[in-house]
Amino acid sequence: MSGVITRSYKAGSIVYFEGDKSEYIYILKSGRIRLNYIRPESGEEIKEDIKQGEFFGVKSSLGKYPREETAQTLSDAVVLQLRLDDFERIVLGNVQVVKKMLRVFSNQLRRIGKAQREVLGETTVVNPQAELYKIGEYYYKNGRPEQALYAFKKYLEYYPNTQFSATSMQRVNDIQSGNFSSASFDDIPSALPPASSSNDFSVADGTSFSAGFSAPSDGPGDMVDFDFDDAPAGGHSELTSEMDNFLSGDDGFAPSAPSFSEQISEAKDMMSAGDFSGAMERFRDLIDDASPSDPTDRELWEDAHFQLGACYYGMGKLKDAMNELSLFVKNYPQSRSVKSAFVYTGYVFEKAGAKDKAAPYYKKAASMPPKDDMTASAMNRLKALGM
Amino acid sequence: MAMMLNDPRFIERFGVDYAPGEVIFCEFEPGHDFYFINSGKVKIVKIINNREKTLDMMGPGDVFGEMAILEEEPRSASVIATEATKVLKFHRDNFDTLLAGNPQLAYKLLVVFSKRIYDAKRRLMILLLNEPTLKVMDVACMLAEQDPHLDLSGTVHLKVNAQEISNWAGISVDDANKSLTHLANLGKIELFHDKVVVKNIRDFQRTVSSRRKQMFSK
């Protein structure tokens, strides 16, 4: 670390002033240093003492903006002065330090976001549900069906059976059937050139969102992206089943009947959207309806049996998942998806708290050719389990 | 540990491909993932006053959607691929594991968050001013400060319109227009349809800073 310089300061010296531009980051080696700054939301003067061994001047240096505080020594002090690349080298070797800093940074960002919301007042609170629909409408009306389709589909995914479901459904059908009013193509606004401000992406964050918004909760495993509150086990409303239809492409609007593989991939899309029960129904239908002879379809058909287990896992029904998975391995031992089934069996055990039972399945999966993403998943889990 | 973000197995596991025009995520959609661009290009857009505004363009090595790491808030903007793009998509639950294996990513996030904090603070300082005209002046200061190529001692050209200014300042477009006209009448700025020319941005900075101090001394 050739670039690191040791600097000694007398008591009462200034290491840097607020407003200075500098790329240096410091570590306090000995002595006392105090940071003085004014909290923007209150005008309050804050004094913060640096502990020995602590970094300071990090944010402004990394973000390349002027110092926000003045750093002054309270006693004779020795600091290490680092350039950015020195700092990078140090932190790359010590992820714990980065994690700690990220935690501090994210707390600051939260606090500022909260202050912004308070200043802007409650009047700007918006309903993300309605806003998501409006985004779809914007793209729809401006002749951009691809972007509109995405927004409407997401709307239906997150907010089935709500205010704009029926319209969203209609839009999706219109777009997918090509029944998309060409009149709306006339007025395509050209996107504005990028603003000179390059980092306002998240500055806009937190200024206009309702604090009361509750997103779908995360599932614990990395397979589970979203949970639906309502598991439409038996009683499908008209809209829900209509949605199933559109998701399956079997809605009568489609120009031609979707192929077996298309239907399979649609069911898989439902899974990745978090609709495990819906996906499972599709898989069951596909399994029942066909026993394809085409080898590719046959493979997908066999794989669909495995997917049933994956769906149960996604729904958190571990026992059912285990049953399906072992049934699948027993009935289709030659299927390519056996490896996936082993990995999922591992997941199930892990989720049930039986790590020791999970490991052998991961090991088995990891040893099976070819090396693919399932191999990687198995190896990752083994690593995580410390094996 | 070596940089894993370029490891083919890693890319295979977390890589997702997008075609030009494809939406990666949409404004107001709940967000659980953050992204690292492996190849290609994306634009970050927001619908503001019934217009799609491009906030930023990003390319290989850039990180986006990182706010999902911090909190479950709806996305504040949409991200759309502008060419064939491969991203690595990480779920927030994997954050700790990821950091442990990818100090490079961790470092990148530190840089990204540093910038976000500064921008957010800067915005907050604008919002806290007590007059629309002062807010508009401070938006100009902020935009000027953000551009490293600008010489702040001379006349400054800012590519910005009233709508964008009103959005930054947290005021109505009407108020923004009134303030801009007022400043133009005073000869402090010139207005064009796609830009604002500030004659003396240092003067703006001084005015804003002294008013800010007065605000707190009361």
Image (spheres, rainbow, N blue to C red):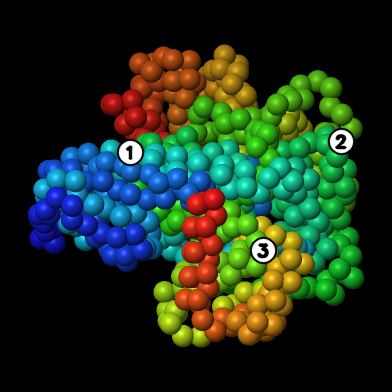
Alpha-carbon neighbours of circle 2 within 10 Å: few (<14), some, or many (≥20)?
A: some
Indicate the amino acid at tag 3: Pro
Tags 1 and 2 on a common chain = yes
**Judging from the image, what secondary structure is the residue with disc 2 in?**
helix
Q: Identify which amino acid the numbered label 1 is placed on.
A: Lys
Q: Which residue is mark 3?
A: B132
- Front residue of A57/A119: it is A119
The reply to whether the C-beta atoms of the residues labelled 3 and 1 are less than 8 Å apart is: no
Badge 1 element: helix
Q: Which residue is mark 1?
A: A100
Chain of the residue displaying label 2: A
Residue behind mark 2: A239
Is residue B187 rendered to the left or right of residue A252?
left
The 10 Å Cα crowd at callout 3, few under 14, some 14 to 19, many 20 or more, is many
Q: Are marks 3 and 2 on the same chain?
A: no
| Label drawn at residue A3 | none
Q: Residue at x 29, y 26 (%)?
A: A386
Q: Is the residue at mark 3 from the same chain as the one at mark 1? A: no
Q: Nearer the viewer, residue B101 or A78?
A: A78
**Mark 3 or 2, closer to the camera:** 3
State which chain disc 1 sits on. A
Establish if B44 lies above or below A304.
Answer: below
Q: Position of residue A387 (x, y in %)?
A: 28, 26
Mark 1 or mark 2: which comes first in sequence? 1
Residue at 52% in and 69% down: B207
- The answer to whether any part of residue A293 appears in the image is no
* In this view, A324 is above or below A175: above
A86 to B28, vertically: above or below: below
Q: CA distance from mark 3 to mark 2?
A: 47 Å
Query: Quadrant of the image for the N terminus of chain A?
Result: bottom left
